[in-house]
Amino acid sequence: MGLPGYMKHAKNAFLKIQSFGRFWPADYNVPCQTDMDVYKPGALGSMMPCFEPEVRKAYVDLLKQGWTDALRTLQPQRARIYTFWDYFRNAYARNAGLRK
């Protein structure tokens, strides 16, 4: 399916459930939208699909449909809120992560 195909599938699923007034909590590998969403901006860009422009655009399209990024709604300016830390180099203890 590939990542762009997955995002299209996710978008269609969101459209289907939107009319039910529910929310869909999960780990969607949220594209890092700002430098606040990653420990070292630019360092991981070529290694992580969530940095790709088409994935970011697909995510923005979901937000335009009325879905809410709950974390950024509640903490719009707070940096270093991560949901992923690599398992090596003591990343968790250093809070060297990214939001995905």
Image: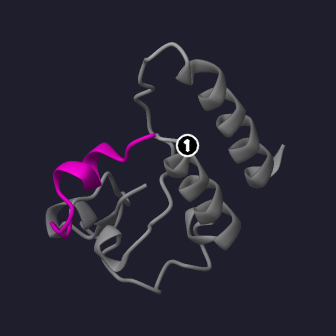
- Which residue appears farthest toward the top when viewing the image? 20
Residue 9: x and y in percent read 74, 36
Image quadrant in which the N terminus is located: top right
Residue at 15% in and 63% down: 93
Q: Compared with residue 34, is residue 1 higher up or lower down, i.e. above or below?
A: above
Image quadrant in which the C terminus is located: bottom left
Residue 60: x and y in percent read 55, 58
Residue 50: x and y in percent read 56, 62
* Magenta region includes residue 77: yes
Judged left or right of residue 28, residue 49 is right
Q: Amino acid at mark 1?
A: Gln
Residue at mark 1: 65
Residue at 18% in and 69% down: 77
Camera-side residue of 94 and 81: 81
Q: Compared with residue 93, is residue 10 higher up or lower down, i.e. above or below?
A: above
Magenta residues (range):
67-80
- Which residue appears farthest toward the bottom when viewing the image? 42
Dot 1: element: loop
Residue at 38% in and 43% down: 68
* Magenta region includes residue 32: no
Q: Residues within 10 Å of mark 1 (few under 14, many from 20)?
A: few
Q: Compared with residue 35, is residue 24 higher up or lower down, i.e. above or below?
A: above
Q: Quadrant of residue 15?
A: top right
Judged left or right of residue 20, residue 9 is right
Q: Quadrant of residue 23?
A: top left
Residue at 75% in and 43% down: 8
Judged left or right of residue 78, residue 88 is right
Residue 98: x and y in percent read 35, 64
